[in-house]
Image (cartoon, grey):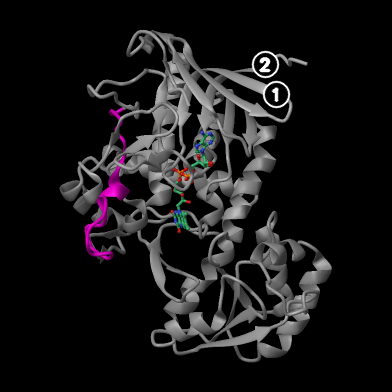
Amino acid sequence: MIRETRKIKSQLAIIGTGLAGLAAGIFATEQGIKTTQVGHTGSVTYTTGYLDLFGSLSGQQYSDPWQGVDELKKEYPNHPLCQIDREEINVAMSLFVEKLTEMGVGYLKPGSKNLDALLPSGVCKPTISMPLTMAAGIRAKKTNASTLIIDFIGLQGFSGVEFVANLKPSWPELSNKRLQFPGMESGQQLFPEVMARSLEVPENRRKLAELIKPLINGFEYLGLPAILGIHLPDEVHREMEGLLGIKVFEIPTMPPSVAGIRLREIFEQRFPAQLITLIPQHKVEKLELTDGGARLFFKDPFGDVEIESQAVILATGRFLSGGLAAGQQSIRESLLNIPVSQPKGRDDWYSEKYFAPEGHGINRAGVEVDDNFRPLDEDGRPLSNRLFAIGTVLANQDWVRQRCGAAISISTAYQAVKRVAGLILDSTIDSPGKSGKISSPAR
Ligand SMILES: Cc1cc2nc3c(=O)[nH]c(=O)nc-3n(C[C@H](O)[C@H](O)[C@H](O)COP(=O)(O)OP(=O)(O)OC[C@H]3O[C@@H](n4cnc5c(N)ncnc54)[C@H](O)[C@@H]3O)c2cc1C
């Protein structure tokens, strides 16, 4: 039996459900744009939950992210963050955090200085915002407060012993105890996601609190791996503090992390109630740009699906998520074969020194865009007035090394959605960048 292709009409299509795509979805809803969003599991579930603005350049760490950005402008003027006004970056980050908090995952409002965020291995890194469940850890460390770190027998992705051993020189009042997690006493491997889902049940929270209570004599703070629920972390956190009578903070675990899973699931739950048709766990197989917008094609278990939209935002990430692909000789963009700015040859992809302060050329490869975040063709002209690229698929940035993943994703999403709103609300801006169709290369 031949099934008819199902068609979805939309003002905007967003490809990707990483931080950039999800931020674009939030901003599009704010603008009242009817949106369809398709994305596969990506790196969002790997994140610590921290939202970085700008933290490091050529080996130097910045407590003032804007001082870092000023230096960045001298060294890498084409970096995406150098294309956006400081005020606009602030607005985008603040709005994103406000909306996340409204959706049910509370975040600290971004300030003007970086926070000293705790990492699972017991080192710190600069970030601008973090989940409320993690915030007390900053104060505990800053004041060298007497703090007990709990971990669990069989737990993967977090060792209290390692955390304490590495931080003890700068935080002498730190100790560790290892417990059995209630209901999971077999001694087998334990995964943070399973524990977090278990703590959604009030009875399990009470059981855990009963185990911890006898240990907290005299401690000011209690640090736990990030396991305080998936859907209502702030409520679980508040209740644990109430049950234990002590300030509690979460520490991110190694990926996949509960903080990232919370983000993915909150969007999957909340987006459908808004103006967004969210199609998770699917990949766009073909993208065709037309004068009137774009057509996207993919298959689901019921057959072929086609999305017709007036504009499209590409938020497909880098190699891990499939937005970029590395071949024997060169790097290409996966959906439209958009020219990728990259080192001349494979020999230049990596520096000889793994820890070279300037980083590796391959990490700065990506799609070049104009001031309006429209990808450029080989002649430096926009491929289309209706195609935008955002997030880490963009060239000229090294988000891991520079500690700026969230800022790149969120602030470029904000800019692109503003352009889309202008395009859709004011059709006079819309003159096609290039005549004819552009479509995904045949596979
Ligand atoms: C281990 C780890 C730790 C991190 N920690 C932090 C941190 O502490 N602070 C911070 O600010 N950032 C952190 N990040 C970065 C952050 O999570 C984002 O990865 C980053 O901001 C890039 O987001 P992105 O949306 O551009 O790309 P990605 O997150 O990579 O998302 C790309 C999306 O596009 C989808 N996609 C690709 N091709 C297609 C297609 N054809 N059709 C449909 N969908 C497609 C992918 O499935 C994915 O959903 C971390 C990332 C990792 C991996």
In the depicted view, which residue is nearer to us: 244 or 277? 277
* Segment tinted magenta in the rendering: 349-371
Q: Amino acid at mark 1?
A: Gly
> Pointers 2 and 1 in contact (CB under 8 A)?
yes
Viewer-closest of 350 and 316: 350
Can residue 83 be seen in the rendering of this structure?
Answer: yes
Image point (72%, 81%), residue name: 180
Tell me, yes or no, whether the highlighted magenta stretch contains residue 171: no
Image position of 339 (left or right of 298): left
Counting from the top left corner in percent of width and height, residue 388 is at: 40, 27
Question: How many marks on residues?
Answer: 2
Q: Which secondary structure, mark 1?
A: strand
Q: Is residue 269 above or below residue 310?
A: below
**Percent of width and height locating residue 394:** 35, 39
Is 360 contained in the magenta span?
Answer: yes
Dominant secondary structure of the magenta stretch? loop
> Looking at the image, is 434 positioned above or below residue 256?
above
Q: Which residue is mark 2?
A: 5
Which secondary structure, mark 2?
loop
**Which class describes the residues within 10 Å of circle 2: few (<14), some (14-19), or many (20+)?**
some
Gap between marks 2 and 1, in whole Å? 7 Å
Residue at the image position 50 percent from the left and 79 percent from the top: 163
Q: Is mark 1 within 8 Å of ligand 1?
A: no
Residue 411 seen in this snapshot = no
The residue that label 1 is drawn on is: 303
